[in-house]
Amino acid sequence: MKDVRDVWDVVVVGAGPAGAAAARAACLAGARTLLLEKAELPRYKRCGGGLIGPSQQALNDAGVDVAALSRDHVGRLTFTSRGRRGFTRAAGPFLPMVLRSELDHALVKVAVEAGCTVRTGVTVGAYSEQDGVVTLGTSTGPVWARAVVAADGSAGRAAAYVGVVCDQVDIGLEAELPTPEGSDWDGRVLLDWGPVPGSYGWVFPKGTSLTVGVIGAHDQGQAIRDYYRSFVASLGLDLTTATHDGGHQTKVRAAGSPLHRGQVLVAGDAAGLLEPWTREGISFALRSGRLAGTAAAGDVSSYPAAVESELGAEVAAGRRALTAFTRHPGVVHAVMRWLPPMWPLFVELVSGRTTMAEQLERRRVRWLVSAVGG
Ligand SMILES: Cc1cc2nc3c(=O)[nH]c(=O)nc-3n(C[C@H](O)[C@H](O)[C@H](O)COP(=O)(O)OP(=O)(O)OC[C@H]3O[C@@H](n4cnc5c(N)ncnc54)[C@H](O)[C@@H]3O)c2cc1C
């Protein structure tokens, strides 16, 4: 017979942005909360580390000092299409760049300050539920909870337990490379619309290093790998000098995909919650994590409606943008280049002063997106 004191109010699996946000929210709602993470912290995470406006907002709300974490603050953007037809636009700094090892560690610290207990080096392998208590099988023995937020990322096990269905699977390939001396990457991002439909590449500056990557449909794996190698080479960079070089899947949930099974909720990448076009996921992880932590500490059944209300419109708008971009990447490039209002609008979108969903409500934008097939 288990001792009732061994049952946590909330256990969170995974200490990425979704898990740390969930743990903090559950603590703030008064729940006795345990956060389990398989790695030791700080740990490397393959990610561009670009913080769009909603990420900055969520981090500020959580008391994380974004300015102190920023390795660069981007105000210039160079756009290319398959490496050609380049042009650069500038604005005041609007996109901070962070290292995920540092960001995620800072988020765990604020969760601990809110009262959360953290155990690292613990891998959760199995989920089961009986009589309102969830049992987690872990590498260090069983753990019990009244509710669990599973935020174990796109390759985790929780999605299968909950029955998450994803209808978009992509592969991101990315390397951390030393910034060449005398180069012009300070405060400047490069975005390249790629040769594989729906793909794009990026260079994100981090001071002494550059994060260089591409993303596109997983079933186009070989073409995406070819794009990655030629993109890096075209920039005069050398993958043999990379400190990290590899791939990671991202997945987008199908409409109506489950967000919980009984008392086990999924958040962030584990739930397939990210923006379908840009595959931006930090803001979705922070926001869904907060919603999941609050629901886990109270009424689990409130979680799907909360996610739909806060994130549903953005996911739907991102799908339309991806469809248009997949069909006509050249048109997207030309519109960015030749329509003067597009750059300030782009900056507003990235800064979070407007959303794609709001823009699609505007007659002219709706017409433009429909005209390119979105
Ligand atoms: C190449 C690439 C570039 C990207 N660039 C950006 C970007 O610039 N900006 C942006 O907003 N988004 C970006 N994203 C998306 C972003 O990285 C993810 O959406 C985000 O990391 C999701 O956070 P999460 O907390 O859900 O999952 P994760 O960050 O993946 O965290 C999951 C955590 O769970 C732990 N874990 C896994 N399994 C277990 C287990 N069984 N037991 C215990 N712990 C476990 C892991 O160790 C990890 O710490 C990028 C993605 C890729 C692939």
Image (spheres, rainbow, N blue to C red):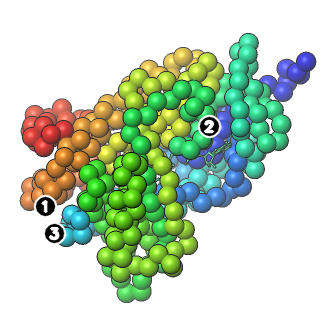
- The one nearer the camera, 159 or 218, is 218
Q: Residue at x 51, y 18 (%)?
A: 302
Q: Which residue corresponds to mark 1?
A: 337
Q: Mark 2 falls on what kind of element? A: loop
Identify which amino acid the numbered label 1 is placed on: Arg
* Residue pointed to by mark 2: 157
Residue 37: x, y in percent?
69, 46
Between the residue at mark 1 and the residue at mark 2, the CA separation in whole angstroms equals: 43 Å
Name the image quarter holding residue 40: bottom right
| Quadrant, the C terminus | top left
Of marks 3 and 2, which one's residue comes earlier in the chain? 3
Does any atom of ligand 1 lie closer than 8 Å to the CB of label 1? no
Q: Position of residue 143 (x, y in %)?
A: 79, 32
* Residue for point 54% across, 26% down: 163
Asked whether the residues under the numbered discs 1 and 3 touch, taking CB atoms below 8 Å apart as contact, a structural biologist would say yes
Q: Is residue 104 left or right of residue 251?
A: right
Q: Amino acid at mark 3?
A: Arg
| Mark 2 within 8 Å of ligand 1, using the beta carbon | yes
Image quadrant for the N terminus? top right
Residue 221, percent from left and from top: 40, 55
Quadrant of res 162: top right
Residue 85 is labelled as 3
Badge 3 density bin: few <14, some 14–19, many ≥20, Cα 10 Å: few
At label 2, counting other C-alpha atoms closer than 10 Å, the crowd grade (few under 14, some 14-19, many 20 or more) is some
Q: Is residue 166 left or right of residue 231?
A: right
Q: Give, as a three-letter code, the residue at label 2.
A: Arg
Identify the mark nearer the N-term, 1 or 2. 2
